[in-house]
Image (cartoon, rainbow, N blue to C red):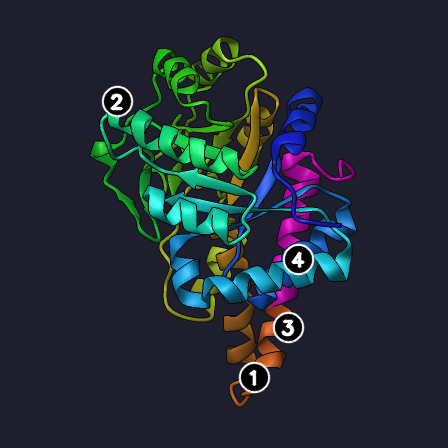
Amino acid sequence: MSLVTSKEMFKKAYEGHYAIGAFNVNNMEIIQGIVEAAEQENAPLILQVSAGARKYANPVYLRKLVDAAIEDTGLDICLHLDHGENFEICKQCVDDGFTSVMIDGSKHPFEENIAITKEVVEYAHSKGVVVEAELGKLAGVEDAVNVNSKNATYTDPDQAVEFVEKTGVDSLAIAIGTSHGAYKFKGEPKLDFERLETIEKLLPGFPLVLHGSSSVPKEFVDLCNKYGGKIPGAAGVPEEMLQRASKMGVCKINIDTDLRLAMTACIRRLFVENPSEFDPRKYLGPGRTAIKDMVAHKMRDVLGCSGKR
């Protein structure tokens, strides 16, 4: 099989009323855990690489690891750049063989966001690569993305239509109340489903994306706290809200923090229970299994994409 774009994936997801998980990768064990889950669940798969992951692992290593995953499993995989901050980074990833890139111009004024996005779209499309953009600002922290809650803004539905028409972008990340990182909400989590419904009606058939959609499972927060330094409790996005969004035009849901918590909880517990352990295989292996189990759960029980490959 091969690297593919998300275009056909999103068409099937929209028509089938489910979402595809886009899972952030940083090293070999995380990639292995994710693809093992996708193979087990027979699910479509997007692996995404952030600016922080590119800096940490080296883009060449990450690309080769994804190639190895395809060879090993026979999966079709969409390789996506998450939160590309400018044209140059997006162009580099297109030239490096990514099949999808995100240009995040959401920090810029509306017209400037359109201009930057259009430039990326024109180049990427000339190479057969699809483009995701963002309109509205999500609060929270994820690698280079850092937006204070007071500066967060929801996506304007009318602007969304204008943005898509003027840029020719292939999918759009919208802000309806999700938040990057583990520390999401003060009080009860709420998503603006009325706004989502309006956007879907104005852009029928068009793939929408949710960032900042980790559920922050309490069991893993509790495990991390029990076996190491304290991770403040936080309310993530309830999984039933993600299930509802996937039936309303949201075709891609980003998942990162859940994976970090699952792996970290597993490794912290192992070191507490086996303090003399020093073989990386003995703690990274179980961490990989924790990733696999988390991804399989998301695909099967939340996103509804198991069996949709």
Return the disc, 1 or 3, that comes first in the chain's sequence.
1
**Residue 58: image location, x then y, percent:** 45, 66
Residue 292: give its label: 4
Circle 1: residue type? Asn
Residue 290 appears in the rendering: no
**Residue type at mark 3?**
Gly
Lateral position of residue 79 relative to residue 233, left or right: right
Q: Nearer the viewer, mark 1 or mark 2?
A: 2
Magenta span contains residue 22: no
Q: Which residue is mark 3?
A: 285
Quadrant of residue 122 within the rendered picture: top left
Along the line of sight, the residue nearer the viewer: 63 or 46: 63
Q: Is residue 109 left or right of residue 175?
A: left
Q: How many marks?
A: 4
Task: Please tell me the numbered disc located at residue 111.
Answer: 2
Residue that numbered label 1 is attached to? 274
Number of residues whose C-alpha sits closer than 10 Å to that of mark 2, classed few (under 14), some (14–19) or many (20 or more): few
Q: Give, as a single range, the part of the protein colored magenta.
A: 288-309
Q: Main secondary structure of the magenta part?
A: helix
Residue 179 placement (x, y as % from top left): 37, 38
Q: Is residue 60 left or right of residue 31?
A: left
